[in-house]
Amino acid sequence: MDDMELPILESLYDSQGRNDALITLLVELCHLLSACLRRDHDTLEEGIESTSIDETIDVPLQIDPYAQLAKTLDKLNKRSGHDGTLLIRACRLSSQSGDGVLPDYQVFFSDIVMDREAVAMMIRRVGDHMTYLNALVSKAFTTFDSFKVLTLHLKLTGDTPELFERLRTSIAIIAKYPQALRKAEDIEIHNNGDIVKLALMKDEKGLPDPNLTMLAGLNAIKPDAMKMLVKEVCNWIKESDTSTGAHRYAGIYDAIAGVKNLRQKLILPPIELNNIRWLLLDRTVGKLPKAKAQIARLVDEEFENTSFDQALYLESLYGSDYNRVNARELGFRIKRVSDMVSAIGDRPKRGMIMDEILANIQWRMEKVPDDVVRQLSVVNGLLSVKDGAEIFEIGRLHEVAARIIEFYVGRLDTRQKMRRIGGKENHFNARDLEILSRDFDISPMDVREILSLLERCFNAEGRFSKIGFEDCVGEFSRYEAKVFEILWHFLKQPMQRDDRIAFLNALQLLFVKMEKPEKALRVLLGDFLEEPETVRFSNRNAMMLANLLLRRYNKELDIDIEITPEEVFLVKEGLNREAATASLMLIDAEREALFEKIRTIHRKIVISLDSGFDSTDDMGFKYLLSLEREVHIFVALLGGDVARSVLRSAINEYGNPDSELYRLAEDSAMIEAFLQHLKVLVRGLGRSGEAIDEWILDQVVGRRQEFLSFSKESRHETLVKRVMEWADRSKEEVRSRRLTEVA
């Protein structure tokens, strides 16, 4: 590629070169921070240096790791697109109690999240010569864990010596803090050759606080003066009304750092250690929402244990890994949430706190696999977990938490009945109707009617009947607002391939009757984008149906759905404008989720090309490529800026014979699949492209000989020729449209 091409075709699929370099830099930063902590911890505590990592890792840093840290921070600061801050945060805390489980952290900088998994994926991608990064990450994360680090929020210092000296002092305080806390003594730090003693500063509850201690160290605040400051700020928070914004602060230090007139008088530490706010925000900036601030203060005031214990309470409510928890761990999280509900009492903002707890735990319970929920049991308010043959009692729940778990446990039976719908012995009782009514926000009577119609769509053997569905379409359409959501929920369940295809085809009949297909599109796109970091089997069905809903129907009613035909690119007047407008608005609002979903799918395609790839989940190369194809067709039908970004990025991958895809391809069948995909992409870009896209398509045509070199078979030559013909046609289509617009 020439220099002109890179800014135009920066790949949506990770911009791998940039991201890999940044991940490497973040690993280096973590290692240097940990080396500074170890160096400044003069009297070693048991456990801090007892790692299995070879000590030669630190040999280059034995003289002064701070010199290298300054250079690394400067490199990060010079990168574009960041806010001047970086966040290191412990993750999967409740999973780390088992033997052999390594401490894990996530590092947030700009739009990158670095953790063990991201490093492992990068090494797999670029080669074994980068495996040394694993050792650096392990050394750094083990050190952070030994120093009881839950969060480290760092402001980049740039190249200002004064700011970097404040950072050095703050790191020295953090390094000495655990020992001073354990021995209940002052911290001793070196300052221009002198030894300075610093007392541990305490919060409003009389508990030592590392951030207040750093604040005192940088501003030479005596203990009595800090006590007075803490008291004044605490009284201000208690006495203020909501208009002052005081209720957004998670704690005393948070308020001191956030109030303008205090912030201007004091030197704030460039590092914040274990500030509860950074357990609640996903990124390094942004105001803490009032509800989250109230939760933070509830935990801080009612559960006066260690910072780690408080972090477990917050993880129980806001954890992002509920799709991976085991039953016992889930039980402990539910118990903590129950304790939080019990602790609310008559606190101010009681309703806000309760709403925040209920919304979050219910959203997360939706992510828990059924086989994990099935192991839970609530009898007379007592939560138990069945672990194999053993029944483990977790504890008694608040009635609100008990009802939530009883609902999700009971829903398993209802969902099982939904999967067996049409079976002779399958009967829905009042409890089932109540659960489905709550699930889909419709009345039990409407649920009963829709289930009755669904049962008529299956024959005596429980197999789906298209004829039966056709008889019910008119009645289904009376419930348009909710019926598709229920049908889609049913379609997501595992079913035989023949039934699935028949069901997908039958839905077209319902689409014809829909007055507002955009409602169904919102259901499909919402489900597709709900977990952008994962891929589910239902994702392809969602995109195929979305492609159907974008078009008005005629002869297509007789076409079986297995894959969306390329001829949809010819649809112009047949595009449903209302549905397309609704979709454009949704993906524009959720463009980051869409981009992340596309990156996730493409990463899995690349991984599936590895000869050592284990496709035990059957979500292999063919499925993933066909899913990506459906997404590309969908955005091409919509057009607009998002579509052009996606299609250009994809052409940068599939239209370049030197890309990773072609390097990893094992056989001619894979190369043929990539070329077929490229044909879809160039046709899609022809539909929505702009002037610059003529040049992009020219680039594809210019690589004809490189593509031909992959094989001498006539079939391959014919396919390459067809791709190039479509690239030329698309280029002419773009040019013609541009000239028409100019005229």
Image (cartoon, rainbow, N blue to C red):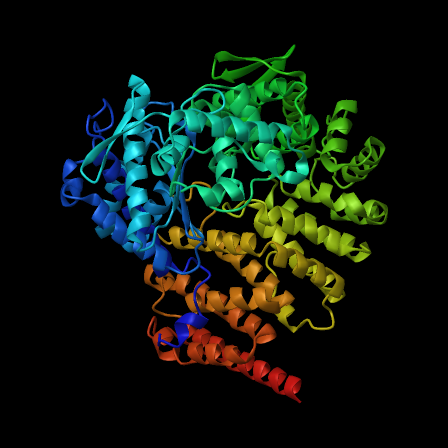
Position of residue 730 measured from the top left corner of the image (x, y, whole percent) = 55, 79
404 vs 669, left or right, is right
In which quadrant of the rendered image does the C terminus lie?
A: bottom right
In the rendered image, which quarter is residue 209 located in?
top left
Compared to 659, does 434 lie above or below?
above
In which quadrant of the rendered image does the N terminus lie?
A: bottom left
Q: Residue at x 67, y 59 (%)?
A: 585
Residue 316 appears in the rendering = no
| Of 49 and 20, the residue lying toward us | 49
Total marks shown come to: 0
Q: Residue at x 66, y 56 (%)?
A: 586
589 vs 434, left or right, is left
| Of 625 and 181, the residue lying toward us | 181
In the rendered image, which quarter is residue 290 located in?
top right
Compared to 111, does 384 lie above or below?
above
Compared to 9, does 14 lie above or below?
above
| Of 717 and 664, the residue lying toward us | 664
Spot the residue most to the bottom.
Answer: 743
Position of residue 296 measured from the top left corner of the image (x, y, whole percent) = 54, 30
Position of residue 21 measured from the top left corner of the image (x, y, whole percent) = 32, 56
Residue 184 appears in the rendering = yes
Compared to 61, does 635 lie above or below?
below
209 vs 466, left or right, is left
Q: Residue at x 24, y 39 (%)?
A: 36
| Of 174 and 110, the residue lying toward us | 174
Q: Residue at x 20, y 35 (%)?
A: 194
Position of residue 624 measured from the top left corner of the image (x, y, whole percent) = 49, 53
